[in-house]
Image: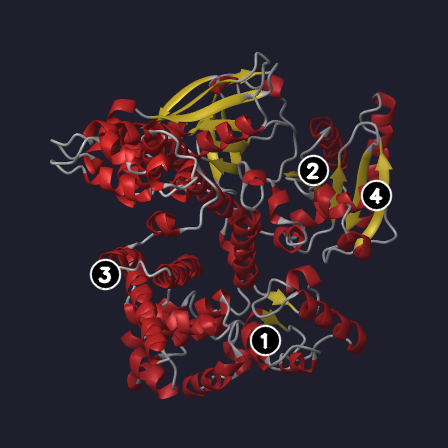
């Protein structure tokens, strides 16, 4: 038991050191984070309320740490399993143990373990069963004074041994020995490692047409790219093309160079067996090693491409979820369509449905005029201020109708200025057909639910988008080819970070939104809503402790992220955690200011300004405190860390601050632009809708997003568009070209 404990201690020390080096963080902080995670604390909670323990890492760094920790723990578990398995076989040498302990990747471990794995029945297995392993071993020594191979082999024939092994001739014995040597060479971890390195340096990823049929993969019908330069989107594209039987894909490596790499490891000069071993090595390379190495390389390339795509998806998802809300306005949602018409829903400032209908703006001029009249009456009746239009089928025609509608209303001069926005409706149909939507709107059919969702996406994108599987939101590339478990984990992490960064009103939040709050899950989120329905609005954070199945640990994790505007305790509507209430109250007492006066007084914009005011002895309400306290001394006096003190001050100055308010607002329009109106050289303003490996798609107010190729983003060299742009960014672009027939618009940012 002592030995196991020591091994575990060594293992965690090794993991801490490695992660510390990789992330550039102190070992002490990394160890603290691992301990906090092992105790069941969530990333948002650790990031926000345990800053002293980890040196104020952000949630992105903490998720990287968590991901790396998971991999390294799996590596250590596999290392222990392999050591145990090889030792049980009685084949664990000091050198092998050293190599296994040195391995830093799972693939390295598996290569070292390969010779000791139980194999399926192979040609070498059959040869061993015939008793030919000693012959193979003797030949492979390639001794200089080795007897003739025929003489060695003859001793293993059935005539000599008196056995009935099926080794009737010398050729049978030599063939079996060659099979054993070939398999042993194939199992050599060093050879495989060097071949993989050579392939990554000099290999080519190639694809060719597997059919005469035209397809979206035509650009890959004669494709060749150095392995070391292959882009993630190219790898994923040829993989899919191969899966759909449009492409034949392989990795090519100069055969002579590959053979030399193998022969250097196995041949010894001056032996009569050298030529025989060389032939076995050639067979091993062509029949065993290269097919296996090619599979492993392609799997590794795919894994890397998937990691990149998942990372890219996460980068796009976060700003999409964090789009600034257009809150408190009566909004009309339009879900465009041809045959089934345009579905309409009007919601009030809190998202409650006020009215619904279906109109047919694409069914001729008469129907269009009728549509404008009906919607105009609804707008007047409910005081609609904004119109949200889904960007799917018939969006362009609906947008044109909406522009006419707005112009007619604005011309009357009796109503508020009305504007519209194009809303990405990806996933709206998935949500409207879901069990969740049926529970929320049992009285509406599927199509009307989509219109409600589109309207709510303008009002509060985060609260609405959390109801949809992140994969269905449509801001990635090849997301349906990703390993589902890894993709779900990454995207759920992004949603969780966004929800907790914003904070959640416990008295209005849906179960979907609550389920992403730190410490809560589907069950506890539903229990909160049930408790709210049965007992009325929550009037304090502490009331959460009465919710069934929400224990002390869950309360600790979630309390700071839930807002209770109706509470008599003002701190319940801030990001100050209940565990810090005493410190916050002590701070206010030292300031000589009441809660009501301090909370939201706006004496300073952020914590840094307040800290400077404390240290410099300036500031209207802080001058008295500044004479006696510096920020460090103040933290000690209050019994909290400096990062926590800064966060408390920030919350007291601006409680419930929504970080989304700092981002560019949604683009609201009053007129419409058509693809036919676009001309090369036009300068326009647009919103980045998607960031992918080779560029960004920008919404410029026409039905089709335009593509800014990576080469047209900026003058300096960038590896990936995400280095300079993110979803939601407002950019100026110049139209380079318009292909109406293929619905393609080419744009440039750098030329603008």
Q: Earlier in the sequence, mark 1 or mark 2?
A: 2
Q: Which residue is mark 3?
A: 94
| Residue 11 horizontal/vertical position (percent) | 33, 68
Q: Dot 4: what SS? A: helix
**Of marks 3 and 2, the one in the foreground:** 3
Q: Residue at x 30, y 79 (%)?
A: 632
Q: Which residue is mark 2?
A: 390
Q: Earlier in the sequence, mark 3 or mark 1?
A: 3
Q: Are marks 4 and 1 in contact (CB under 8 Å)?
A: no
Q: Which residue is mark 1?
A: 554
The reply, left or right, for residue 692 in relation to residue 717 is right
| Residue 413 horizontal/vertical position (percent) | 74, 39
Q: Residues within 10 Å of mark 2 (few under 14, many from 20)?
A: many
Q: Which residue is mark 4?
A: 378
In the rendered image, the quadrant that contains the C terminus is top left
| Residue 272 horizontal/vertical position (percent) | 17, 30
Q: Residue at x 63, y 22 (%)?
A: 674
| Disc 4 from disc 2: Cα separation | 19 Å
709 up-or-down from 182: above or below: above
Q: Residues within 10 Å of mark 3 (few under 14, many from 20)?
A: few
The reply, left or right, for residue 585 in relation to residue 515 is left
Residue 51: which quarter of the image? bottom left
In the rendered image, the quadrant that contains the N terminus is bottom left
**Of marks 3 and 1, the one in the foreground:** 3
| Disc 3 from disc 1: Cα separation | 48 Å
């Amino acid at each position: 038991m002592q030995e196991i404990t020591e091994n575990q201690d060594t293992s965690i020390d090794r993991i801490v050191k490695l992660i510390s080096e990789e992330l550039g963080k102190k070992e002490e902080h990394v160890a603290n984070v691992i301990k906090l995670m092992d105790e069941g604390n969530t990333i948002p909670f650790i990031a926000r309320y345990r800053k002293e323990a980890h040196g104020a890492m952000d949630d992105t760094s903490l998720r990287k740490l968590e991901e790396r920790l998971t991999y390294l723990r799996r590596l250590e578990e596999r290392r222990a399993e392999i050591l145990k398995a090889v030792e049980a076989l009685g084949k664990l040498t000091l050198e092998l143990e050293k190599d296994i302990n040195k391995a830093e990747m799972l693939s390295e471990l598996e290569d070292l373990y390969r010779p000791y794995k139980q194999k399926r029945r192979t040609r070498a297995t059959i040869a061993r069963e015939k008793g030919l392993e000693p012959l193979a071993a003797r030949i492979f020594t390639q001794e200089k004074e080795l007897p003739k191979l025929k003489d060695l082999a003859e001793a293993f024939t059935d005539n000599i041994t008196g056995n009935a092994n099926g080794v009737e001739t010398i050729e049978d014995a030599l063939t079996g020995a060659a099979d054993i040597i070939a398999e042993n060479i194939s199992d050599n971890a060093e050879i495989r490692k060097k071949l993989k390195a050579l392939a990554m340096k000099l290999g080519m990823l190639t694809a060719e047409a597997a059919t005469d049929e035209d397809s979206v993969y035509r650009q890959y019908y004669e494709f060749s790219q150095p392995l070391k330069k292959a882009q993630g989107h190219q790898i994923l594209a040829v993989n899919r093309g191969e899966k759909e039987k449009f492409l034949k894909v392989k990795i090519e490596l100069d055969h002579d160079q590959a053979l030399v790499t193998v022969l250097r490891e196995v041949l010894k000069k001056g032996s009569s067996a050298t030529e025989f071993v060389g032939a076995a090595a050639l067979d091993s390379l062509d029949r065993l090693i290269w097919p296996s190495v090619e599979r492993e390389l392609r799997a590794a390339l795919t894994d890397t491409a998937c990691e990149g795509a998942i990372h890219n998806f996460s980068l796009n998802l976060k700003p999409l979820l964090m789009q600034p809300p257009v809150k408190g306005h009566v909004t009309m949602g339009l879900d465009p369509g041809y045959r089934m018409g345009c579905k309409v829903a009007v919601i009030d400032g809190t998202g409650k449905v006020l009215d619904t209908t279906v109109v047919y703006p694409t069914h001729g001029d008469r129907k269009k005029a009728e549509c404008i009249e009906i919607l105009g009456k609804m707008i007047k009746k409910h005081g609609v201020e904004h119109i949200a239009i889904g960007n799917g089928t018939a969006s362009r025609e609906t947008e044109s109708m909406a522009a006419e509608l707005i112009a007619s209303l604005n011309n009357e001069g009796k109503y508020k200025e009305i504007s519209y926005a194009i809303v990405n409706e990806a996933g709206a149909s998935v949500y409207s057909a879901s069990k969740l939507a049926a529970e929320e709107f049992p009285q509406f059919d599927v199509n009307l639910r989509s219109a409600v969702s589109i309207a709510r996406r303008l009002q509060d994108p985060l609260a609405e988008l959390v109801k949809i599987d992140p994969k269905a939101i449509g801001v990635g590339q090849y997301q349906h080819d990703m390993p589902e478990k890894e993709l779900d984990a990454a995207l759920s992490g992004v949603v969780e970070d966004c929800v907790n960064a914003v904070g959640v009103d416990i008295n209005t939040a849906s179960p979907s939104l609550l389920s992403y709050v730190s410490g809560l899950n589907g069950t506890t989120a539903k229990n909160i809503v049930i408790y709210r329905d049965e007992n009325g609005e929550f009037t304090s954070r502490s009331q959460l402790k009465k919710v069934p199945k929400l224990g002390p640990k869950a309360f600790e994790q979630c309390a700071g992220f839930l807002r209770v505007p109706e509470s008599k305790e003002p701190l319940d509507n801030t990001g100050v955690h209940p565990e810090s209430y005493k410190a916050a109250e002590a701070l206010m007492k030292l300031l000589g200011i009441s809660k009501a006066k301090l909370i939201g007084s706006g004496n300073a914009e952020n914590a840094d300004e307040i800290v400077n005011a404390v240290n410099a002895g300036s500031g209207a309400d802080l001058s008295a405190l500044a004479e006696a306290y510096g920020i460090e001394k103040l933290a000690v006096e209050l019994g909290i860390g400096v990062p926590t003190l800064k966060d408390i001050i920030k919350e007291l100055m601006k409680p419930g601050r929504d970080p989304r308010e700092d981002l560019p607002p949604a683009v609201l329009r009053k007129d419409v632009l058509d693809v036919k109106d676009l001309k090369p050289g036009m300068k326009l303003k647009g919103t980045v809708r998607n960031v992918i490996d080779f560029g960004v798609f920008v919404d410029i107010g026409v039905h089709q997003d335009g593509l800014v190729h990576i080469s047209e983003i900026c003058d300096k060299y960038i590896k990936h568009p995400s280095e300079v742009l993110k979803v939601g960014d407002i950019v100026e672009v110049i139209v380079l070209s318009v292909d109406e027939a293929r619905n393609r618009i080419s744009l440039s940012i750098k030329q603008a």
